[in-house]
Image (cartoon, rainbow, N blue to C red):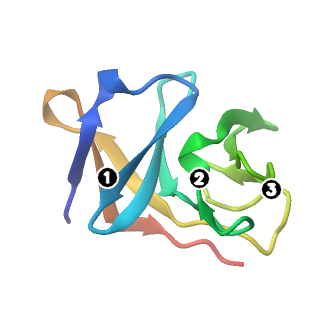
Amino acid sequence: MSWTTICSVEALRPESGVCALVDGVQVAVFMTYDGELHALSNFDPYSEAYVLSRGIVGTRKGEPTVASPLHKQVYSLVSGRCLDDETLSVPVYGVRVGNGGLVEVSLEQRVEVGV
């Protein structure tokens, strides 16, 4: 299992995201208000643009979400499923805080979402 260090956990702000390039894959890493970390593809399949890290973090029925900054489709930070269009989804990746308080992402722990 391979983990890539992204940044220190102190560099993340609650309710916002950052973009990181992990082995050539753009990953959007988010910290929710309660301090949970989530990582998913930065690619918004609706707008076909790499923008999700710039989205608005929130919740829908208690599920942490991000709304695309372009057309506002809402994606679950847990499953990657689009909550506005069931034909859309984005890959979800493993994320953790490793030694020294560094945020790490693993593309190998990707959660595949059925469409």
* Image quarter of residue 57: top right
Q: Amino acid at mark 1?
A: Val
Question: Callout 3, which amino acid?
Answer: Leu
- Indicate the secondary structure of the residue bearing disc 2: loop
2 and 1 marks in contact (CB < 8 Å): no
Disc 2 target residue: 51
Q: Image check: 6 left or right of 73?
A: left
Residue 15 rendering spot, x and y as whole percentages:
58, 27
115 with respect to 100 (left or right) = right
- From the viewer's side, name the closer residue of 1 and 90: 90
Residue 91 in the image: state x and y as whole percent: 53, 66
Q: Classify mark 2: residues with Cα within 10 Å, few (<14), some (14-19) or many (20+).
A: some
The image shows residue 33, relative to residue 22, as above or below, that is above
| Residue 17: percent from left, percent from top | 51, 37
The quarter of the picture where the N terminus appears is bottom left
Residue that carries the numbered disc 1 in the rendered image? 105
Q: The C terminus appears in which quarter of the rendering?
A: bottom right
Residue at left offset 33%, top offset 25%? 11
Residue 6 vs residue 65, the one in the foreground = 6
- Under circle 1, the secondary element is strand
Q: Nearer the viewer, mark 2 or mark 1?
A: 2
From the image, tell me which residue sits under label 3: 83
